Amino acid sequence: MKRTSVKIVVAGGFGTGKTTLVGSVSEIAPLTTEELLTEAGVGVDDVTGVESKTTTTVALDFGRITISPDVVLYLFGTPGQDRFWFMWDELAQGAIGAIVLVDTRRLDSSFPAVDYFERRGIPFVAAVNRFFGECPYTEEEIRGALELGADVPLVWLDARDRASSKLALVSLVRHAMARLPVARAH
Amino acid sequence: MIEDWDGDDESEAGRFLPLYILVNGRTTPRNSSLDLATQVIALAADATRLEPEYLQILNRCGNWISIAEIGAYLHIPLTIVKVMVDVLLEQGYLDSGSPAQQRVVDPALLGAVLAGLERL
């Protein structure tokens, strides 16, 4: 088999525990890589009125799990700021799917991620991070708030715990497999 | 005096060229299947003519390594790593594995990933 890379995206609002999850299952300490982007902006003190451009650095945290001698799984956390959607496109392209972390203190902060993967037909599971203590909501309430489809798995996890994070990943891969088009015999 | 110049000060002084000059102004890789998770490995080739910045990348590729990892270890932005890796692939210094680019629809690959995760 040729050397093969597979990706899983770990998404969710700012501070939902993405890097914690990556770190709990990765075989290497999470690495940070940077992407530069140029943003057009209007300089307020620019007397000529010419648009100025500023360069912004977007940091991405990621980890690695060697699956077999030929297959390596990379786990990429999405950038904390929702506005860097172009980075999401690069991360999501070719990914097995995504884990959307849910912070029960701020359910709505994970909605943009749910919406993103839903619209693109990318398999995802919602993972409620219990790190934040007792969950005041029922599964139905969370499903309702995030407008989760009936087929989207919802799991409870502690992102700091390796076994717990592993179960969320397993749940995602099973979900992605269940969504594969059934091969037709002709 | 110009006569005393041996023409070799570049290699001694090191380089402080902007990276966009190193990549000849190229802004996107020609090989558009390059992904941040694509893994590469060094091939046996004479690298003595390579610029130090390219050599630095090549030296990281003794074992399979992803573009994202190269960027993280060498503190080079992803877009630039991609273009530089593309140049090295084109010139036969590197080989690349399968990119994680197409939607994964291979049940055997997903099955292997599932089994690998369950072994964790």
Image (tube, coloured by chain):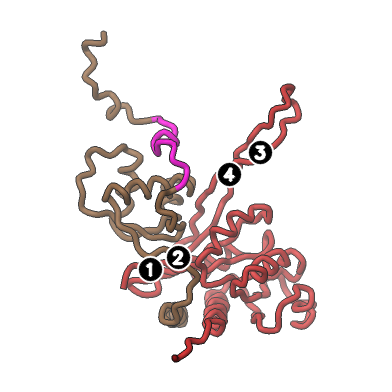
Chain colours: A red, B brown
Dot label at residue A106: none
**Nearer to me, A156 or A153:** A153
Q: Which of pointers 4 and 1 lies earlier in the amino acid sequence?
A: 1
Q: Quadrant of residue A98?
A: bottom right
Residue A143, by quadrant, is bottom right
Quarter of the image for the N terminus of chain A: give it: bottom left
| CA gap, disc 3 and disc 4 | 10 Å
Q: Where does label 3 land, which residue?
A: A40
Tell me the residue at 62%/72% (across/down). Answer: A121
Q: Residue at x 45, y 91 (%)?
A: A185
Amino acid bearing label 4: Leu
Q: How far apart are marks 3 and 2 (CA)?
A: 31 Å
Q: Which amino acid does label 3 sit on?
A: Ala
Do tag 4 and tag 1 residues touch (Cβ < 8 Å)?
no
Q: Are marks 2 and 1 in contact (CB under 8 Å)?
A: yes
* The magenta segment: B16-28
